[in-house]
Image (cartoon, grey):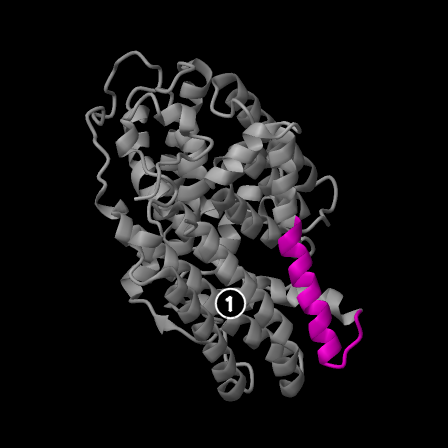
Amino acid sequence: MSPTVLSPALSPVLSPVLAPSSVPAHGVGNRADLPLPFTALVIAAVAALLISFVAVGVLWREPRLSRADGVLLPRPLARLLDSRGVRVVARVLAGILTVWTLVALVAGPDSARNPVPHVVYVWLWVGLAFLSLALGPVWRVLNPLRAAHAGLLRLARVSPDLSLLTYRGGLWPAAVGLGLFTWVELVADENTSLPFLQVLVGGYVALSLAAAAVFGRRWWDEADPFEAWSALLGRLSPLGRRDDGRWVLRTPLHGVDELRATRGLVATVSVMLGSTAYDGFSANVSWATFVQTSPIGAVPLKTMTLLLFFAAVAVTIWLAAALSMRLSGRSLRDSVHFVSDLAPSLLPIAGGYVVAHYWSLWVYQGQYAWVLLTDPLGTGANLLGTAGLTPNDALIAPTLVATIQAVAIVLGHLLAVVAAHERAVTVLPRRAAVVGQLPVMAVMLFYTFAGLTILFRP
């Protein structure tokens, strides 16, 4: 088993509470736990990507994904998903959890027993990602701030579409917000202390409600970072709607293909990919030693490196788009549009990285939040009856985690290859689409090798 390394945000929270041997890292598998040698895994992954690229180039001659595709869900299940009662219950439960957490935030102890860091860094960040991958953009339904904004408008007896200014920022505020939250989680000092979290949560609530008051509910639809996080990862959900509005089971490619270019999409996807890549990289012992001995200072050095990870994703996809246009006989100006067309195809990679990096954090440390939520004020009470809960570690066996990590990375890249090809044959002539994808394929091979190396470093 690899050395135990806690999530940077949770290290000071869990260390005094759980025995060191029982606390999992983001991923507890290493090269020794892989179902096949690391070199063989890399060769197999590269071969799978190359074979899939050749196969779709030969067999996938025209766009094949349609909004009419999918297996219809049974009517009772579809009615349940559309039920207003289900949505109301979900919102009420989310509201209760929010109030419960705010009580702990305002009046709870500034210690490892406070549940707020777990709710913010494990449930909200990681749990929301896994829930969205399974069910779709659930935060649109559960978001307590969206509900509070709508409730305030109803109390004021004004239209729910009220806005003072027209919103035109696209996903850019979401990209900035996700980047800042990643910085808070992975870089900021004292990020689990109660005063820090009070400022963080209070500032986010105030800014969000103020922005919604100015721009209306389009702020939630496009600019809110957690709604964007949920909506983009939710594109990979097997649940979706056909063009006639009926619920269906479909491939992750269908949701990705429905996403069209929008302002700030490339930046948002770059933050999503760069953040998980940096998270894995920052757990490297050599990096930690370098940070501790660097004269620059830990926070500035980590901040610059995190920004470099964001920039690396954006630059590589921009270069791939520019080279693709050049090989396709198009002008470099066309790459401005083509990079936005390609950006959605990176979502399967982002989803694979989320599963690979956060599987063990979610299935283990997510359980422990129930223990802390049972006593939000730190009085020794057992209000939920979960104080004696012991997290089950059956799903974090090293070989199982290593296998999940490897499969998630490789499968994400395979889906990305197909998604990129579908988009290319949609917007380019077939021959130009195949030839033009060569730089994109090179970038995805690089991402695959880098992702596997970061996860399974020696």
Residue 245 visible in the shown view: no
Closest to the observer, 202 or 56: 56
Closest to the observer, 348 or 8: 8
What is the x, y in percent for residue 49? Answer: 47, 73
Magenta span dominant secondary structure: helix
> Is 331 part of what is drawn in magenta?
yes
Q: In terms of image quadrants, where is residue 408?
A: bottom left
**Disc 1, SS:** helix
What is the x, y in percent for residue 438? Answer: 62, 76
Q: In this view, does 234 lie above or below 52?
A: above
What is the x, y in percent for residue 300? Answer: 65, 31
Q: Magenta segment range?
A: 311-332
| Residues packed near mark 1 inside 10 Å, few (<14), some (14 to 19) or many (20 plus) | many
Question: Which residue is at a point 25% across and 21% down the rendered structure image?
Answer: 383
Which amino acid does the dot numbered 1 rest on? Ala
What is the x, y in percent for residue 365? Answer: 33, 36
Residue occupying the far top of the picture: 379
Residue 309 visible in the shown view: yes
Question: Which residue is at a point 76% across and 81% down the rendered structure image?
Answer: 329
Query: In the picture provided, is 217 more to the left or to the right than 70?
Result: right
Quadrant in which the N terminus is drawn: top left
Q: In this view, does 367 lie above or below 265?
A: above
Closest to the observer, 69 or 452: 452
Question: Which residue is at a point 24% across and 35% down the rendered structure image?
Answer: 391
Q: In this view, does 105 lie above or below 269?
A: above
> Is 20 part of what is drawn in magenta?
no
Task: Identify the residue under disc 1.
Answer: 416
| Count of numbered badges drawn on the protein | 1
Query: In the picture provided, is 30 more to the left or to the right than 141?
Result: left
